[in-house]
């Protein structure tokens, strides 16, 4: 089903829509952070912990792999190989698709499929540091932001940029010498920016050494506590409203593009592109024409 | 004008459309890569080199800063401070906007404004490692992918993911001990994956130490050579067609979302979201309804 989802025909969209109605039981967890933080190792370790707690798990890993070939990296899969034979775990590595917004759409559909298939927890892993993170927040109940000690200036900036999307912070590779300093800095950044808590939830900063499973049980505890908090504070309604709105907007963007590119529906897209390239007509005007005559 | 563009009213869109007609003279260069590669330093250094060559330059820096507050990081600006007083340089730091696709739209509009304002070269800097990179390629004549020696596994994966989008590879911080190894590996990855050249252009792998300006003149040379190649091979038409199509699609996505959320146009968006949240109606059906009744 996810393979069909990735192929992105509208026929599939209708099937996913039906699956969506059957879902709504899984907890959707997002794990993100800058490259080099060891997210894949953390995910493998966390999934093992969740399995010990008798949760079935779906993993949707978004690879930063070729946007053009649709291929994906083997590294993560190899790291997760021991989980591949566990029938309680479903792993799917999504290639970043070339289409504008194509990945966002395929990902939330893959989450919907895993949810409808009865997984207790669906874990979405991304390696983005930009818009991707915003999108993950809008598709998840709980967002975990992973970092590691001793990364450079750019990473500091990235950290600052994703401070506000985290429900839980993890400093992985915490056996490195500068780990305590990183944790201290992160806590300070959270306090200074006024993001030490969200909706009555005090955002924890956890230390893990995912490679050795250290701190991962605590992470699993915290994730459960966060979900309980969402329920008891009724924050879950607001989150799920955000998730539903994001879902709708993503589909609408996708459908709008599908239609203007479909030669059987609207005017000639290629001719419109050529007008814009040659600056004969203003892009905004052309876009409005295309949209209005193809929907 | 760019401030108005960021605010995103459709009135502005029409003005930008007019500016677009006046533009088309600037070379649009994209610089991207994983965090920690030293992109901002490279950009500063490159701009100094371009100024010595009497090019006026517009810089559109996309910060990985708060998607919610609309704020942006000071770090890059401080680093570029010496360029701020040069009337031949325009610097704009774009905050990542919360809206789906909002950043992509605001960025290409900011590029159009800088182009129409007469800048010879417009430099777009991103710190993304996912969809953002694909988008940058679609908006630029030349894409430079920056990496640095001695980064981790995740970074390797990122590199693999962005191999195909580069017209030029730069290994920055090339005074580090593992630099030659990184350059060798990168060349090998390019050859193995069949991306050592594109459209008759052999993709170079340059070594720079941006902090000391080393290799930056060569980078400026290569960027000029690549533009000349685009012209002489007529590849420029294909590129500019891609740029125009990307521009159209980005606007269409933005307009489609604006309209469904505008209470004065279509049916009640919040009510539709609530139906989806409660799984009363299928998202795909709801999305189609919204789109058809609001366009």
Image (cartoon, coloured by chain):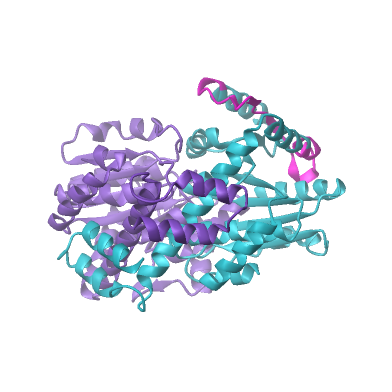
Chain colours: A purple, B cyan
Residue B58 point in image, percent of width and height = 72, 56
| Residue at image location 75% in from the left, 33% down from the top | B225
Is A280 on the left-hand or right-hand side of A71? right
Is B158 on the left-hand or right-hand side of B60? left
Viewer can see residue A211: yes
Residue B240 position by quadrant:
top right
Q: Is the N terminus of chain A in the top left, top right, bottom left or bottom right quadrant?
A: top left
Residue at the farthest bottom position? B264
Residue A193 point in image, percent of width and height = 52, 72
Q: Is the C terminus of chain A in the top left, top right, bottom left or bottom right quadrant?
A: bottom left
Nearest the eye: B127 or B118:
B118
Nearest the eye: B25 or B152:
B25
Magenta stretch encompasses residue B205: yes
Residue B153 point in image, percent of width and height = 48, 36
| Residue at image location 24% in from the left, 74% down from the top | B271
Viewer can see residue A104: no
- Number of numbered tags placed on the structure image: 0
| Residue at image location 63% in from the left, 60% down from the top | B110
Nearest the eye: A16 or A152:
A16
B285 to B185, vertically: above or below = below
Residue B92 point in image, percent of width and height = 67, 62
Nearest the eye: A123 or B287:
B287
Magenta stretch encompasses residue A85: no
Which region is colored magenta? B191-220
A9 to B117, vertically: above or below = above
């Amino acid at each position: 089903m996810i393979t069909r989802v990735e192929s992105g025909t509208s026929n599939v969209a209708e099937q996913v829509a039906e699956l969506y109605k059957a879902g709504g039981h899984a907890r959707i967890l997002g794990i993100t952070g800058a490259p080099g933080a060891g997210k894949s190792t953390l995910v493998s370790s966390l999934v093992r912990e969740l399995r010990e707690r008798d949760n079935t798990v779906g993993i949707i890993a978004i690879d930063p792999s070729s946007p053009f070939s649709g291929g994906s990296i083997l590294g993560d899969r190899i790291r997760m190989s021991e989980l591949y034979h566990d029938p309680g775990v479903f792993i799917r590595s999504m290639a970043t698709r070339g289409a504008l917004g194509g990945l966002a759409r395929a990902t939330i559909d893959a989450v919907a499929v895993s949810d409808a298939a009865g997984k207790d927890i669906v874990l979405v892993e991304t390696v983005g540091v930009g818009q991707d993170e915003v999108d993950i927040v809008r598709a998840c109940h709980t967002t975990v932001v992973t970092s590691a000690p001793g990364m450079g200036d750019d990473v500091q900036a990235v950290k600052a940029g994703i401070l506000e999307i985290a429900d839980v912070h993890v400093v992985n590779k915490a056996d490195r010498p500068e780990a305590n300093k990183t944790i201290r800095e992160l806590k300070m950044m959270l306090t200074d920016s006024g993001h030490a808590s969200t909706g009555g939830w005090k955002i924890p900063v956890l230390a893990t050494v995912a490679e050795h499973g250290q701190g991962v049980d605590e992470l699993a505890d915290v994730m459960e506590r966060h979900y309980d908090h969402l329920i008891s504070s009724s924050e879950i309604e607001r989150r799920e409203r955000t998730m539903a709105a994001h879902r709708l907007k993503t589909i609408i963007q996708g459908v709008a593009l599908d239609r203007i590119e479909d030669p059987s529906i609207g005017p000639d897209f290629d001719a419109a592109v050529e007008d814009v390239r040659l600056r004969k007509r203003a892009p905004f005007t052309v876009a409005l024409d295309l949209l209005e005559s193809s929907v």
